[in-house]
Image: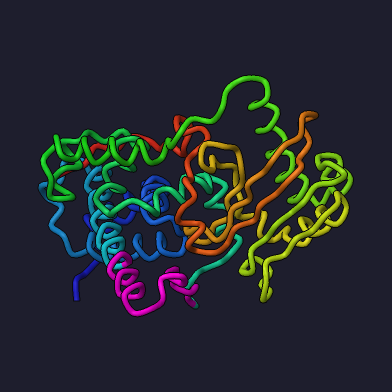
């Protein structure tokens, strides 16, 4: 067994620990899961211990390369599992069930808050190469020439992949003007009141005749659910406070709404309708996979989406 107590081993261990926040940020954004990011860093550490580091000029960039390659393998394996699952099951249930190794829900919620729920959801729709190209370039400012060898593409093709991913992240623009600002604030206030358990504030956001429609998978119930009136709707929202911790603002088909995700995968969305006074008159809660697939989810502020620090990759 390799002796890892020598000076070179100690230097590598010190560098890995110093770079751990950066490496964790890369893995988080590539995988969308705190638990999977931990697994990726563990695998990267094992690989790093076995490498010859004498020729490495940029240890941080080299470690970033190792983590990225581990994450890329995990993304490809995940995609293959999904394809196998979809091929074997009815496509109305094409989201694989949550596994026992899903990790600590509190840590997953912190990740969602740090990176942005909508960004994690949109990243999960990208292919592995697209995701790596976009995350490394747009979020960590790594040049395309340094990303290309990781995904087996030319720099020009890598630029195209990142551009395609960027368009997916940005989606269609939300309406501009005073009404749009007011609607965004109302949706943000709805989420804040739900998270904080502020029943009075929640009722104040709702029209007295507000109507909430939820499909059968939300509760779950045998049939879709309809709730009418500000107080009943507010009580229903308050009951979902645990879900609200992994919920974030998003654009849903170009309109402000909310998306709830687990490990970067959308579980439900809330679309809102508004009255002329700015209060919420309708809420459509969607969890049925077929309807979720047809909903265009995009990031509200793509320019602020969880950027990290630059780390040149050492090839």
Which residues are the magenta region?
78-99
Task: Kindly tell me whether residue 208 is visible in this rendering.
Answer: yes
Q: Which colour scheme is used?
A: rainbow
Task: Point out residue 66 in the picture as x, y percentages from the top left corner.
Answer: 24, 54
At 26% from the left and 36% from the top, the residue drawn is 142
Task: Point out residue 47 in the picture as x, y percentages from the top left corner.
Answer: 22, 63
Q: Does the magenta stretch include residue 82?
A: yes
Task: Kindly tell me whether residue 17 is visible in this rendering.
Answer: no
At 46% from the left and 53% from the top, the residue drawn is 294
- Left or right placement of residue 226 versus residue 248 in this view: right
Q: Which of 118 and 23 is in front in this view?
A: 118
Task: Point out residue 284 in the picture as x, y percentages from the top left corner.
Answer: 66, 52
At 46% from the left and 50% from the top, the residue drawn is 120
Q: Does the magenta stretch include residue 80?
A: yes
As drawn, 238 above or below 303: below
As drawn, 46 above or below 304: below
Quarter of the image where the C terminus is located: top left
- Left or right placement of residue 281 versus residue 153 in this view: right
Q: How many marks?
A: 0
């Amino acid at each position: 067994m390799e002796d890892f107590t020598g000076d070179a081993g100690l230097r590598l261990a010190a560098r890995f620990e110093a770079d751990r926040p950066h490496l964790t940020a890369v893995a988080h954004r590539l995988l969308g899961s705190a638990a999977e990011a931990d697994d990726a860093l563990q695998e990267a550490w094992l690989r790093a211990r076995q490498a010859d580091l004498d020729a490495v000029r940029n240890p941080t960039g080299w470690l970033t390369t190792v983590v990225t390659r581990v994450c890329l393998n995990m993304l490809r394996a995940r995609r293959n599992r999904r394809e196998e699952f979809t091929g074997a099951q009815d496509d109305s249930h094409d989201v694989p069930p949550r596994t026992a190794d899903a990790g600590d829900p509190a840590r997953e919620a912190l990740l969602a808050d740090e990176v942005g729920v909508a960004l994690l959801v949109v990243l999960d729709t990208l292919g592995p190469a697209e995701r790596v190209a976009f995350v490394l370039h747009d979020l960590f400012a790594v040049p395309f020439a340094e990303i290309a060898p990781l995904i087996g593409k030319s720099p020009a093709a890598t630029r195209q992949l990142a551009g395609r991913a960027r368009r997916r992240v940005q989606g269609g623009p939300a309406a501009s003007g005073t009404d749009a600002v007011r609607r965004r604030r109302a949706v943000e206030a709805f989420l804040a009141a739900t998270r904080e358990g502020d029943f009075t504030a929640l009722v104040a956001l709702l029209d007295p005749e507000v109507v909430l429609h939820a499909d059968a998978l939300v509760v779950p119930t045998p049939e879709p659910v309809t709730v009418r009136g500000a107080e009943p709707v507010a009580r229903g929202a308050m009951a979902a406070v645990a879900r609200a911790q992994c919920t974030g603002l998003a654009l849903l088909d170009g309109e402000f709404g909310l998306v709830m995700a687990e490990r970067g995968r959308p579980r439900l969305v809330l679309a809102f309708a508004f009255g002329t006074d700015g209060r919420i008159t309708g809420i459509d809660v969607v969890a049925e996979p077929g309807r979720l697939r047809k909903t265009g989810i995009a990031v509200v502020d793509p320019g602020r989406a969880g950027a990290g620090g630059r780390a040149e990759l050492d090839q």
